[in-house]
């Protein structure tokens, strides 16, 4: 899934350029195996994958796959703009990532309204179970280069070289991760800034 664009047409669009997974009125399950999601850009959120669990439960499995070089832009002023360059999880979303990489994704840019946007360059939100995987080289304009606002269980994995680019000369928190709790076992978190 590559080289797609989700533009904003002043109607709440611009989400999920590569994949938009909708749990509306029930549940949505998705499994991605031996696949690549790359070079997609959303004008609001979820450059690679947007999981919408605001009106139903969403379960996602990503196995032996790559989510890379995706971007979510900040076009100004709307909550959620520029979040989740690689993967955006809103509402009730469970994501299992195994033997995979989420790398070199980016979120946000300075909007025209003079406020920052863009958190979670690699992954934004959700309940994440990550094993034998790499979260590497992602960047965010505002907060959390690697992972933002998620509850995590991370095992035998690496979170490294992610960064917050900063706003008006000041970088926000969580170069590697800004999480809502969880467990990290036999893993490496290094070189984030």
Image (cartoon, grey):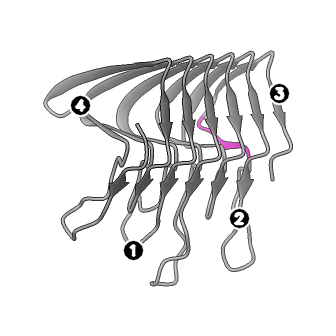
Q: Is residue 27 left or right of residue 44?
A: left
Q: Estimate the x, y position of residue 6 in percent, counting from the top left.
A: 32, 56
From the viewer's side, name the closer residue of 67 and 170.
Answer: 67
> Residue shown at 68%/80% (left/top)?
168
In the image, which disc is placed on residue 77?
1
Ranked by sequence position, the earlier of labels 4 and 2 is 4
**Mark 1 vs mark 4, CA separation in Å:** 26 Å
- Alpha-carbon neighbours of circle 2 within 10 Å: few (<14), some, or many (≥20)? many
Q: Say which mark, if any, is on residue 141.
A: none
Query: What label sits on residue 188 in the rendered view?
Result: 3
- Find residue 128 and report its horizontal and vertical position in percent: 53, 26
| Cα–Cα span, label 1 and label 2 | 19 Å
Secondary element at tag 3: strand
Q: On the image, which quarter does residue 164 sit in?
A: bottom right
C-alpha span from label 4 to label 2: 32 Å
Which quadrant would residue 152 be assigned to in this image? top right
Q: Residues within 10 Å of mark 3 (few under 14, many from 20)?
A: some
Residue for badge 2: 165
Residue shown at the point (42%, 62%) measured from the top left: 81
For numbered disc 2, what is the local secondary structure?
loop
Work out whether 63 lies above or below 105: above
Q: Quick one: which residue is furthest to the left in this view?
A: 25
Q: To which residue does mark 4 refer?
A: 23
Residue at 61% x, 35% y: name it: 102
Query: Counting residues from the N terminus, which is met first, the one under dot 1 or under dot 2?
Result: 1
């Amino acid at each position: 899934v590559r080289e797609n664009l989700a533009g904003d047409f002043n109607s709440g669009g611009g989400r999920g350029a590569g994949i938009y997974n909708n749990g509306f009125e029930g549940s949505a399950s998705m499994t991605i195996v031996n696949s690549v999601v790359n070079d997609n850009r959303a004008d609001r959120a979820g450059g690679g994958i947007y999981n919408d669990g605001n009106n139903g439960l969403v379960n996602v499995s990503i196995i032996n796959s790559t989510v890379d070089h995706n971007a979510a832009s900040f076009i100004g002023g709307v909550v959620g703009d520029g979040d989740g360059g690689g993967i955006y999880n809103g509402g009730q979303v469970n994501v299992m990532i195994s033997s995979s990489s989420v790398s070199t994704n980016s979120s946000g840019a300075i909007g025209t309204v003079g406020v920052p946007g863009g958190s979670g360059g690699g992954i934004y939100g959700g309940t994440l179970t990550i094993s034998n995987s790499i979260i590497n080289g992602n960047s965010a304009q505002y907060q959390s280069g690697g992972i933002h606002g998620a509850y995590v269980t991370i095992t035998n994995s690496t979170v490294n070289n992610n960064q917050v680019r900063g706003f008006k000369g000041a970088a926000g928190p969580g170069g590697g991760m800004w999480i809502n709790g969880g467990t990290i076992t036999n893993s490496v978190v290094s070189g984030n800034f």
